[in-house]
Amino acid sequence: MQTTKVERVRGVRDILPNTYHIDKQIKNALSDSFESYGYRPIDVPLIEYTELYLKKSGEDIVSRLYDFIYRNRRLCLRPEFTASVVRAYLDNFQEIPLPVRLYYTGPVFRYEKPQKERYRQFTQMGIELIGAKGAIADAEVISMACQGLDSLGLTEYQMFIGHVGVINKFLDHLELDTRLRSFLLTQMETLRKEGKQVVENLLSEIYPAFQKNSSAQQQPGKNITTKKITDLLQNLEEEEARTAIFEFLESMNIELSSTREPEEIVDRLLVKIKHQNQTKQLNQALDFMTELSQLKGEPNAVLKETEKLLSAYSIDDYGLKQLQDILESLDAFNVDKNRINIDLGISRGLQYYTGMVFEISDSNLGERKLCGGGRYDDLIVSLGGKETPATGFSYVMEELRQVLAEKSHLNINNYQFVEILVVGMSSDDYVYTVEIAEKLRKLGLRIETDIIGRNIENNIEYAVKHNIPFLIILNSVEQQDSKVLLQNLESGEKQNLELNEVVKS
């Protein structure tokens, strides 16, 4: 009876030997780059409590978690590294002097529709700089991202730097519901590429009360008097609204009897009223974000346009001053100014970013993103630590490998894992072949032996198919002192050499 073949899980893939070796080379180059800045390696578990990512990761990642219950514990596969590294910092590094410089590499998991070169399991490699604030720290991180790419030979890229503090400050003022705020932060790219109409349609799906025209007529059947009252309370300052409610209840001789304090009841009522219909705030947010998302390009020109926009919306320019400081600090790292752009439409979809954010894209391959990151000063507090600034970035290794292949910087099909195949004339020669192979390995060569008894012709065919360039054929009866016959399988040339001479050939 034939058994059913067990298929590979959809959305993941096998990393075969040639590709594995290329990944190893990329990781080694990036590790050397990171360590030249004083960063130390760390690894964290594949599995974490789901709560770790519910705190601050944002809807874009939370909705794609591999999330499950096991023995009454809610667990997930890590969807990214930053939250896990911060958790490890809180567990292990709080007693050492700041800053803490760490780098990592490993698989992460997100449940999304598989696409070409996009998988549900992929590999991130990046750094976290914990305990340093200011432009110099941000510039170090950006510079490291550039130098890592340079070390791989990927020098045709453009950098886009933004600041989520600009949009966060505006959304803070609107006091939007957390879910709606999170949704908006994930839509900056959509606003830029597909337009406001698309985002409005998406917003209507998750928030049916939304009306594209904030002055639209209320729905039939809605109590007009109730609407007038709630509109009045929504437009009052919080303390004024609280006083108005208490005075109204007192004038009607209504007492609040409950297990809760009257103040708590009124505060909960105010929150509900404030969030009852946020159409006006949502329209304001979309108008501002639409304009902001278009501000992208040469730094000086974009900063001037952004100043005008912030002034029109009465928002301070603190975020822009931080960007200017970062640009000045990048000069110290000799980052090419021609590669630097300001892009106020970057949000990166993660709620934990608080300041500078950046992405680097290959300018010749459709602006394919090579890496990204930013500052997240509130994450450590949200995970139970004391206030600690932090910043970092990560590469997607599969993306780097693909870009390197497309640019012909590497060939994943021709790596020579084995340099010499050592074989015997017959099975009686196997002990002798092992002895010679061991001596050659101690001289630093990668050696394979025939262990299944192929004939010479089949061994040559095997070596060619496995990209093994040299062959040594041994006969234990006719040992030539310490010499062996080395055959170049491409040219056919044969040489009778001492073992130490084989290394030099």
Image (cartoon, rainbow, N blue to C red):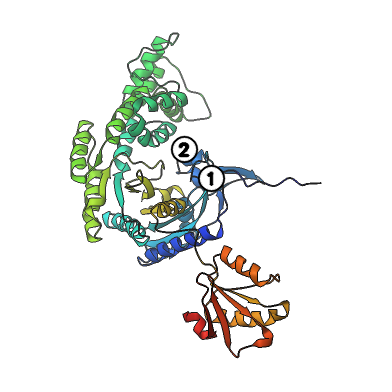
Determine if residue 54 is in view. Answer: yes
Q: Secondary structure at mark 1?
A: loop
Which quadrant of the view contains residue 66?
top right
Badge 1 or badge 2: first in the primary sequence? 2
Is 300 positioned to the left or the right of 195 in the image? left
Q: Position of residue 52 (x, y in %)?
A: 51, 47
**Point 69% across, 47% down: residue:** 6
Asked if marks 1 and 2 touch (Cβ < 8 Å), the reply is no
Q: Amino acid at mark 1?
A: Arg
Which quadrant of the view contains residue 4?
top right
Q: Residues within 10 Å of mark 2 (few under 14, many from 20)?
A: some
The residue that mark 1 highlights is 120
Query: In this rendering, is residue 477 above or below 473?
Result: below
**For the view shown, which residue lies furthest in the right direction?**
1
Q: Secondary structure at mark 2?
A: helix
Q: Position of residue 1 (x, y in %)?
A: 81, 46
**Point 19% across, 37% down: residue:** 305
Q: Residues within 10 Å of mark 1 (few under 14, many from 20)?
A: many
The residue that mark 2 highlights is 59
Question: Which label sits on residue 111?
Answer: none
| Nearer mark to the viewer, of 1 and 2 | 1
